Amino acid sequence: MSEIQDQNGPPQPVGEAYSGASEIEGCKLSGLGLVALIPRKLEDIPKLKGPFVAKVLNESDDEIAFVISSPQVHNLMNCCLAEISSDILFVANIEISPHIRGGKGVGVDFYANLSKEAKKLGYRFLTGYHNDPETARFFINRGRYLVEEVKDELRSHFQVLEDQEDDESVLHTIQFLNPEDVDSFIKPERVGTNADSKIEFRGRLNSLLKS
């Protein structure tokens, strides 16, 4: 795992003096409160002690990179988020320290927080891409759909997602932050299918395209 070094000094403590909000202007990410993303499950890891803090590393008009740290481990989580359309929030990168991996629930907690905050900001879709089916399975098991399951006539809505990485081997996934959007966007026969079915479905499509 690569390490992102903070060149702007130590993280600021969570509290009234530090809201954790981004200073981006012109997109919904300007309202993101980083403190709300800190996984509470970190408090259950014996070797870690708070305070847990969040600090912006860099930001642009439509993107923010930040780190979540503790006094013991500076880079617990590194994350980069991007607004790729007015209703799509894209997780461009996330790196999780070995200290907090392995069934501790930190990743699940983080994504639950991110989903909640993204919906508050007005996004309808939380998206990302994954290099292999097993990584994608983590997200699919928690309700995401593959972009291939979107209705053909609506697929163009997510072209901006597919444009983030055109390698045919990666899997693009979509979390619908408004449950009613599932039936609107997903092919009826694909609604509610499990991870095995989704990955098999994508494999069949790819085989057809290559034949």
Image: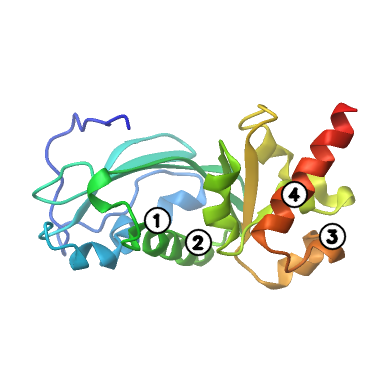
Q: Which residue is mark 3?
A: 187
Q: Which residue is mark 2?
A: 121
Alpha-carbon neighbours of circle 3 within 10 Å: few (<14), some, or many (≥20)? some
Alpha-carbon neighbours of circle 2 within 10 Å: few (<14), some, or many (≥20)? some
120 sits left or right of 42 in the view: right
Mark carried by residue 131 = none
Q: Quadrant of the C terminus?
A: top right
Q: Which residue is mark 1?
A: 32
Q: Earlier in the sequence, mark 4 or mark 3?
A: 3
Residue type of the residue flagged with mark 4: Glu
Cα–Cα gap, marks 4 and 3: 16 Å
Cα–Cα gap, marks 1 and 4: 36 Å
Per the image, label 4 sits on a secondary structure element best described as helix
Which residue is outermost to the bottom? Answer: 180
Per the image, label 1 sits on a secondary structure element best described as loop
Q: Nearer the viewer, mark 3 or mark 1?
A: 3
